[in-house]
Amino acid sequence: MLTVLNHALIKHKISIMRNKDTSTYIFKQNLDEIAKLMAYEVTREIPLREKIIETPICQTVGYEVDQPLVLVPILRAGIGLVDGFRDIIPTAKIGHIGMYRDETTLEPIEYYARFPKCMPESIVIVTDPMLATGGSASMAITNIKKRGAKKILLVCLVGAPEGVERIQKDHPDVDITLAALDEGLNERGYIVPGLGDAGDRLFGTD
Ligand code: PRP
Ligand code: URA
């Protein structure tokens, strides 16, 4: 399933991020704020178990989250969504998967992977600001499935239709959430209108 969040604050903040004159500092600040809004939305339906609790007045039925939550940012740029998610889900464990796109072939190359042991029983939230061809996210999800994960959510800031199609074809069981669905890709594989190279803008590299 694809969900594109239709939220006024997200549209406002993402427009600031798209602006080429926005500094690294303001870019990260807006990414943090959007990440919190996205964390709130993607966890709306996660399973709960009932728990009897005592209020100061009486006994009642309360709730607690029924499964561990694991965040897996796709390095580098995926790291940018982690702070906001952790503010909302402070008990989440964090896995890491490192990938970069070969600039000529646009094929992803994996260089690092480390995950917590609880992957099989967890809800795994894969984060990356950009879903372009979908190659990086698809390879990351394949790797995460090999670690036993059964419930995987992909959360990206900006997606291209090509990337969405690729994930839906390779991983039809994975729900995709985007803050914005853009027009497509240019000849260099960048999302149009997009926001440029997310990693470079986030970390101030060029
Ligand atoms: C960017 C982005 C995604 C990938 C998307 O990473 O953060 O991981 O490109 O492209 P795709 O959908 O076509 O695979 P990049 O390769 O620039 O690495 P970085 O995060 O280290 O900057
Ligand atoms: N990676 C980015 O950082 N930006 C794009 O537009 C596409 C891939």
Image (cartoon, grey):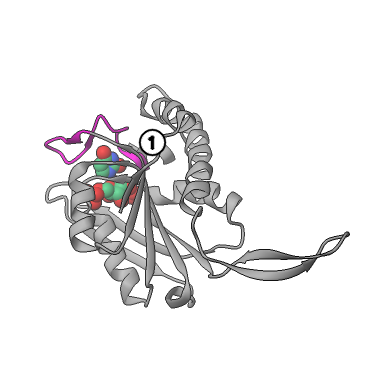
Residue 60 visible at all = yes
With 145 as the anchor, is 109 left or right in this view? left
Q: Which residues are magenta?
A: 183-199
Of 133 and 69, nearer the camera is 69
With 48 as the anchor, is 205 left or right in this view? left
Give the dominant element type of the magenta stretch: helix, strand or loop: loop
Of 161 and 201, nearer the camera is 161
Of the 4 image quadrants, the one containing the N terminus is bottom left
Q: Residue at x 42, y 70 (%)?
A: 114
Q: Is residue 70 above or below residue 1?
A: below
Q: Pinpoint residue 34: horizontal percent, then vertical percent.
A: 48, 39
Quadrant for ligand 2? top left
Q: Is residue 184 above or below residue 171?
A: above
Q: Residue at x 53, y 38 (%)?
A: 33
**What kind of element bears circle 1?**
helix
Q: Residue furthest top?
A: 21
**Residue 47 magenta-highlighted:** no
Q: Pinpoint residue 21: horizontal percent, then vertical percent.
A: 39, 21
Q: Residue at x 42, y 63 (%)?
A: 96
Within 10 angstroms of label 1, few (less than 14), some, or many (20 or more) residues? many
Does the closest atom of ligand 2 sit within 8 Å of the Cβ of label 1?
Answer: yes
Quadrant for residue 154, please give it. bottom left
Disc 1 marks which residue? 201
Q: Pinpoint residue 10: horizontal percent, then vertical percent.
A: 45, 33
Amino acid type, label 1: Arg
Q: Is residue 183 above or below residue 46?
A: above
Residue 133 visible at all = no
Of 160 and 41, nearer the camera is 41
Of the 4 image quadrants, the one containing the C terminus is top left
With 90 as the anchor, is 195 left or right in this view? left
**Residue 189 magenta-highlighted:** yes
Q: Residue furthest right?
A: 56
